[in-house]
Structures are given as structure tokens and as C-alpha cells.
Image (cartoon, grey):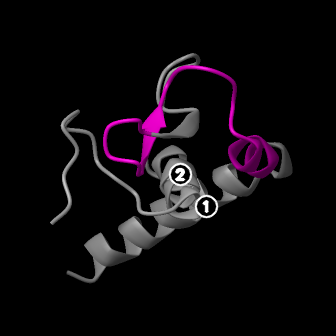
Amino acid sequence: MIKCVSGKKIYLTQEQAEEALVGAHTRFDYAKGHGPINVYQCEDCSYYHLTSKGTVNDVLAKRQKEGKIDRDKEADAWLNKLKRKHS
């Protein structure tokens, strides 16, 4: 397993990191101004990490503007309700 000296989770490509960024916003309810907002290439390991600093990532901003993250959150909530009902 590849590790970074920073201890942060690594993503092999920028695209994987951006999908993880969007996924984090789908799964978690971050307070305004909190949580990861972008990705960056690490100087230590040369892979990608999530960051809460800087400007909002274009992919994240686009999906937020389109309402995709809110729709995915709602879909996940319904799936979890159905799973609990059938277990």
C-alpha cells in the first residue's frame, strides 16, 4: 500500500481525488466553511490529497450548482432507510 509521510489518504489521479471530494460532500453534512473543497498534488508523495484550503474545485462547484450533491444525499438517505427496513 502506498503511503504519504503526511498521513493523508492518497489518490492516484486528480480524477480519483475529485470523485472522492464529491463523494465526501455527498456522505457528510459539512458546516458552511468546513470540510474539503479542493484537491492538490502532494510535493512529498506526488499523489493527490483533499484539502480544505484554497478555492473550491471546479468539479465540486459544478455538481453543487447543478444540485447533484443534494440529490445524491437524498438518494443515499432513502437507500439507508430501505436497508434498515429490510434487515
Q: What numbered label is drawn on residue 26?
A: 2
> What kind of element bears circle 2?
helix
Q: Residue drawn at (38%, 67%), measured in percent from left and top? A: 80
Q: Residue drawn at (41%, 35%), measured in percent from left and top? A: 43
Q: Does the magenta-highlighted stretch encompass residue 8?
A: no
Category of crowding for the residue at label 1, using alpha-carbon neighbours closer than 10 angstroms: few (below 14), some (14–19), many (at least 20): some
**Foreground pick, 44 / 49:** 44
Category of crowding for the residue at label 2, using alpha-carbon neighbours closer than 10 angstroms: few (below 14), some (14–19), many (at least 20): many
Q: Position of residue 4 (x, y in %)?
A: 23, 44
Q: List the residue tagged with mark 1.
A: 72
Residue 55 occupies quadrant: top right
Circles 2 and 1: CB atoms closer than 8 Å = yes
Q: Quadrant of the C terminus?
A: bottom left
Q: Position of residue 54 (x, y in %)?
A: 62, 20
Which is nearer the N-term, disc 2 or disc 1? 2
Residue type at mark 1 is: Asp
Q: Residue drawn at (47%, 59%), measured in percent from left and top? A: 77
Note whether 79 is above or below 70 in the view shown.
below
> What kind of element bears circle 1?
helix
- The part of the chain drawn in magenta is 42-64
Residue type at mark 2 is: Thr
**Foreground pick, 55 / 81:** 55
Is residue 28 visible to us here? no
**Foreground pick, 39 / 75:** 39
> CA–CA distance between discs 2 and 1?
6 Å
Q: Quadrant of the N terminus?
A: bottom left
